[in-house]
Amino acid sequence: MIPPGCHDAEQAGRLVGKSKSWMYQQGAAGNIPRSKLGHHVFWTDEQIAEIIRGAAQEPQQRKAETRPATQKRTPQTPPRDTPRKRPAPPTANNKRIPVADRSVSRLYRQEG
């Protein structure tokens, strides 16, 4: 049972702009203020205002541009003019075992 003038997790989350589960998780972790009566968890208007004040951030200063406005950025990797080609298959491996010849089917090969 929630006392009058207080909000449950769903109502408080709607006021703060967060989900019900976020309100429960952050309240249990002690990151935001909450009230608890037995197993009922609720938030007062003052606690909700404190959560919103705590979330306020100072505006960040943008870094000044160091290059002239007319200079364009260069891409990190230049585009390739030619497509990449696959390397040729090896003719033999490290143990000097010949690689199978795939150009002629073994059915038509003349065994001598």
Image: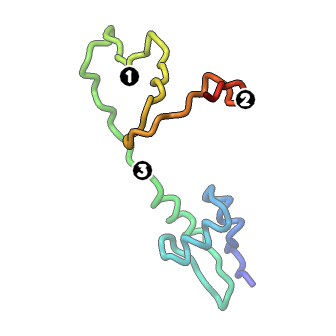
Query: Are there few (<14), some (14-19), or many (20+) residues within 10 Å of tag 2?
Result: few
Query: Are there few (<14), some (14-19), or many (20+) residues within 10 Å of tag 3?
Result: few
Residue occupying the far left of the picture: 66
How many numbered badges does the structure rendering display?
3
- What residue would you read off at disc 3? 57
* Real-space Cα separation, disc 2 to disc 1, in angstroms: 48 Å
**Residue appearing at x 35%, y 17% in the figure:** 73
**Residue appearing at x 57%, y 66% in the figure:** 48
Task: Tell whether 83 sits left or right of 66.
Answer: right
**Residue appearing at x 62%, y 59% in the figure:** 18
- What residue would you read off at disc 1? 77
Could you say which quadrant of the image residue 14 lies in? bottom right
Q: Nearer the viewer, mark 3 or mark 1?
A: 1
Where the C terminus falls, by quadrant?
top right
- Earlier-in-chain disc, 2 versus 1: 1
- What residue would you read off at disc 2? 107
- Dot 2 lies on which element? loop
Mark 1 residue type: Thr
* Real-space Cα separation, disc 3 to disc 1, in angstroms: 36 Å
Could you say which quadrant of the image residue 19 lies in? bottom right
x then y, percent, for residue 40 = 68, 84
Mark 3 residue type: Gln
